[in-house]
Image (cartoon, rainbow, N blue to C red):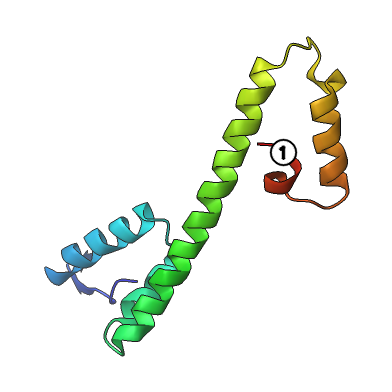
């Protein structure tokens, strides 16, 4: 993602502007963007405002989906910890969730709230 650096005495010499670019790449990574997405996002910002906004909206939708899945998983584990059965695989709730998953339902639909 960085421009090819110049060399002096065999060492790479990046321009001062590369520091800001590295910071932007780190921020995008922390926000959940892959290197490929970061490259597309950084390239699109100079072409058209809607290009990077479109990428950002897609990432927000991905994050919302990940958060929903993680929240459902957290609820399922919390309920499992509260289950009175010593062996959770003998719990009727567990069996119904397993059956729903085997029927193709995602955890969000299989796990009763």
Q: Quadrant of the N terminus?
A: bottom left
Of residues 55 and 69, which is closer to you in this image? 69
Q: Position of residue 58 (x, y in %)?
A: 47, 70
Query: For mark 1, what is the residue?
Result: 111
Quarter of the image for residue 19 reads bottom left
Residue at the extreme bottom: 47
Examine the image and state in which quarter residue 24 appears.
Answer: bottom left
| Image position of 71 (left or right of 105) | left
Q: Secondary structure at mark 1?
A: loop
Residue at 55% x, 55% y: name it.
65
Q: Position of residue 95 (x, y in %)?
A: 86, 30
Residue 26 in picture, x, y percent from top left: 30, 56
In this rendering, position of residue 97 left or right of residue 47: right
Quick check: can you spot residue 4? yes
Count residues near mark 1 (Cα–Cα under 10 Å), then give few for <14, some for 14-19, many for 20+. many
Which residue is painted at 34% across and 85% down in the image?
50
Q: Relative to residue 105, is residue 2 depicted above or below?
A: below
Q: Quadrant of the C terminus?
A: top right
Depth order, front residue of 44/65: 65
**Who's the residue at 54% across and 51% down the image?**
66
Residue in view at x 65 percent, y 32 percent: 76
Q: Is residue 49 left or right of residue 100?
A: left
Position above or below: 86 against 29:
above
24 or 1: nearer the viewer:
24
- The image shows residue 80 at horizontal and vertical percentages of 69, 22
Q: Decide if residue 79 is on the left or right side of residue 7.
A: right
Would residue 10 be visible to someone looking at this image? no
The part of the image, by quadrant, that contains residue 11 is bottom left
């Amino acid at each position: 993602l960085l421009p090819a650096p110049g060399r002096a005495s065999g060492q790479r010499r990046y321009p001062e502007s590369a520091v800001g670019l590295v910071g932007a790449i780190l921020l995008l990574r922390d926000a959940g963007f892959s290197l490929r997405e970061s490259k597309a996002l950084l390239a699109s910002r100079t072409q058209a405002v809607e290009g990077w906004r479109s990428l950002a909206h897609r990432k927000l939708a991905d994050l919302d989906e990940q958060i929903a899945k993680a929240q459902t998983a957290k609820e399922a584990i919390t309920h499992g910890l509260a289950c009175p059965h010593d062996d959770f695989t003998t719990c009727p709730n567990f069996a119904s969730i397993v059956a729903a998953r085997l029927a193709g339902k995602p955890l969000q639909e299989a796990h009763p709230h």
